[in-house]
Amino acid sequence: AQKITQTQPGMFVQEKEAVTLDCTYDTSDPSYGLFWYKQPSSGEMIFLIYQGSYDQQNATEGRYSLNFQKARKSANLVISASQLGDSAMYFCAMREGGNAGNMLTFGGGTRLMVKP
Amino acid sequence: GAVVSQHPSRVICKSGTSVKIECRSLDFQATTMFWYRQFPKQSLMLMATSNEGSKATYEQGVEKDKFLINHASLTLSTLTVTSAHPEDSSFYICSARGHSKNQPQHFGDGTRLSIL
């Protein structure tokens, strides 16, 4: 079974509007971390935001916020006030267990295209 | 933020050549480094996990003798693609993490390998 599922292969959003990128996960481990990365066409992976399974509040980092719904096992990324530079691939990833050395499992990604 | 340097960024070489890719953590000690492979328009697939001073742990289906990984120090891991063939052409990207449990993996900028 897929551990990380991103159901939106591609999305369009109008510049300056907010957009939500979906991510659902599957784990039986009570301790896990959820990450979002941005990958522009140049290929590098840029860390955006992190949510721990025991965190009480949703993570926020500037224009990025994570809508963490633990019971639903979802960790959607919300980008507010979209900018043209936000056009990229976005990957949701999960790290299971409390050991930071554990590997990341990635979702299939969502290509976001911001329209001027 | 933490910086991971990956070199070279682009390699084009003939079939049968061995190619070495370096991954360095510039401002933190990376106990664990990860090597990923990414095919066009696909997600990242973990190839192997390397811990400083010990043998790398390879994912199922990844040939150890084909993809040699050396993690000689806390700041350097290398991936050598031995006797590369056209099917090895891909985007290879490394990541490293520090000691803190909640730290994200920081990625290098990737290496685009093209075997003629």
Image (cartoon, coloured by chain):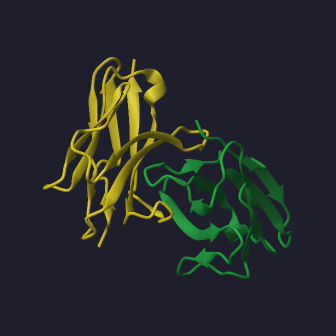
Chain colours: A yellow, B green
Coordinates of residue B110 in the picture (x, y in percent): 66, 50
* Residue A108 in view, yes or no: yes
The answer to which quarter of the image holds residue A3 is bottom left
* Residue B116 in view, yes or no: no
The answer to which quarter of the image holds residue B38 is bottom right
Could you tell me which residue is drawn at 30 percent across and 62 percent down? Answer: A31
Locate the N terminus of chain A and report the quarter of the image it occupies: bottom left
Could you tell me which residue is drawn at 32 percent across and 38 percent down? Answer: A11
Image position of B90 (left or right of A96): right
Locate the C terminus of chain A and report the quarter of the image it occupies: top left
* Front residue of this view, candidates A79 and B41: A79
Vertical placement of residue A45 versus B68, above or below: above
Coordinates of residue A35 in the picture (x, y in percent): 39, 48
* Front residue of this view, candidates B95 and B98: B98
Image position of A105 (left or right of B115): left
Could you tell me which residue is drawn at 79 percent across and 50 percent down? Answer: B8
Image position of A43 (left or right of A99): right
* Front residue of this view, candidates B98 and A10: B98
